[in-house]
Amino acid sequence: MNNENNIPDEGEVILIDKPLTWTSFDVANKLKRACKFKKIGHAGTLDPLATGLLILCTGKKTKQIDTYQAQEKEYTGTLVLGKTTPSIDLETEFDAEYPTDHITAEIMESARRALTGSITQIPPIYSALRVDGERLYKKARRGEVVEIKKRHVEISLFEFDATHFPSVDFRIICSKGTYIRSMVRDFGQLAGSGAYLSALCRTRIGAFELKDAWNLTDFIQQKRIELKLEVEE
């Protein structure tokens, strides 16, 4: 530690449990201001309505961001059959209802199998993906129609529990670039219905696990104590 803010020159890798409704950028920006980091970035965006593991890198460690982003990820969550929203989650209002009475365990299992292994998917229009230099969600909010290219992803595990049908709890292990909301949308369509995501948590990125992540407020308080800064209320 030899710079004016007593921040390690080599940087660090920080694991944070992202709070609900915060964007990944919100977390990075809060840490940068509160902990006096000169350079910080996150390794993989989480939607505002998702919680869970967010890896952030500071200083020279930011060079490793691409390495972390490329690693396998694990998610748990809940989808609900019978309704849809434009964003495929609860960020937007319901726009349609669909029947669910016909959906059997066999139909759901068939949908699960179709969405396991090497698959192609279309990212949600409400996403941070850039098209023509602009985030897709900005185009979506203006009501623009955009052609979104399909992408190939690998789903190594997709398991679910429909005990509380039409709510379906799931666990997914997937490759870089996978959109869980796209899987939810496609699951609903394959079941002859519609679906939206009601909850999502990222539990693992590569060897990093959510159980080892900091609460955002706790990390900031601990870091400010280390830096001999006034602890934020």
Image (tube, rainbow, N blue to C red):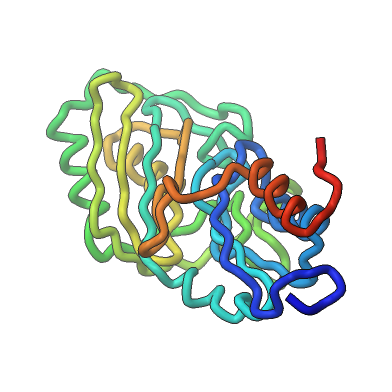
Question: Vertically, is 226 above or below 104?
Answer: below
Position of 190 compared to 2: left or right? left
Question: Vertically, is 194 above or below 224?
Answer: above
| Residue 139 visible here | no
Quadrant for the C terminus in the image: top right
**Front one among 202 and 100:** 202
Work out which residue is located at the far left of the displayed protein and give it: 106
Percent of width and height locating residue 202 = 44, 48
Q: Residue at x 48, y 70 (%)?
A: 68
Percent of width and height locating residue 208 = 41, 59
Q: Residue at x 44, y 72 (%)?
A: 70
Q: Residue at x 82, y 41 (%)?
A: 232
Percent of width and height locating residue 51 = 53, 41
Q: Quadrant of residue 35?
A: bottom right
| Residue 60 visible here | yes
Q: Residue at x 78, y 79 (%)?
A: 2
**Front one among 122 and 61:** 61
Quadrant for the N terminus in the image: bottom right
Position of 122 compared to 102: left or right? right
Q: Quadrant of residue 189?
A: top left
